[in-house]
């Protein structure tokens, strides 16, 4: 039986990475630039900066790295 894979495009370099479903919980990294593939980019509504953050840390109330404004409020993610 063939192992099922998921293809995830790296947010940093754009490389398509084939990740087996059984390895998704291991925080997979890009084969080209070694960036974690579970990172997401949240745009700050105040200054427009792009903030890269691991998905599992969203509950920690992230703030913008430039203007220090909260990126998440009331349990919702502010993305553009």
Image (spheres, rainbow, N blue to C red):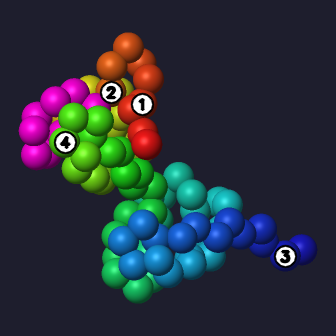
Marks 4/1: CA–CA distance: 16 Å
Q: Which mark is residue 39?
A: none
Q: Position of residue 38 (x, y in %)?
A: 45, 55
Q: Are marks 2 and 1 in contact (CB under 8 Å)?
A: yes
Magenta segment: 64-71
Identify the residue under disc 1.
77
Mark sitting earlier along the chain (4/1): 4
The crowding category of the residue bearing disc 4, from other C-alpha atoms within 10 Å (few below 14, some 14 to 19, many at least 20), is few
Mark sitting earlier along the chain (3/2): 3
Q: Is residue 29 highlighted in magenta?
A: no
Circle nearer the viewer, 3 or 2: 2
Q: Are marks 2 and 4 in contact (CB under 8 Å)?
A: no
Q: Secondary structure at mark 4?
A: loop
Q: Is residue 62 left or right of residue 77?
A: left
Identify the residue under disc 3.
2
> Residue at the spot x=32%, y=27% of the render?
72
Q: Quadrant of residue 18?
A: bottom right
Q: Quadrant of residue 45?
A: top left
Q: Considering the image in quadrants, where does the C terminus appear? A: top left
Magenta stretch secondary structure, dominant = loop
Circle nearer the viewer, 4 or 1: 4
Most foreground residue, 42 or 32: 42
Identify the residue under disc 4.
47
Q: Position of residue 78 (x, y in %)?
A: 39, 32
Residue 78 vs 25, above or below: the answer is above
Q: Position of residue 33 (x, y in %)?
A: 34, 81
Q: Is residue 79 left or right of residue 2?
A: left
> Residue at the spot x=10%, y=38% of the render?
67
Marks 3/4: CA–CA distance: 47 Å
Identify the residue under disc 2.
72
Marks 2/1: CA–CA distance: 5 Å
Q: Quadrant of residue 77?
A: top left
């Amino acid at each position: 039986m063939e192992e099922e894979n998921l293809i995830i495009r790296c947010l940093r370099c754009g490389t398509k990475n084939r990740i087996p479903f059984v390895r998704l919980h291991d925080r997979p990294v890009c084969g080209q630039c070694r960036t974690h593939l579970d990172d997401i980019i949240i745009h700050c509504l105040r200054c427009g900066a792009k903030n890269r953050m691991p998905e599992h840390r969203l509950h920690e109330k992230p703030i913008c790295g430039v203007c220090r404004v909260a990126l998440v409020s009331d349990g919702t993610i502010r993305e553009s």
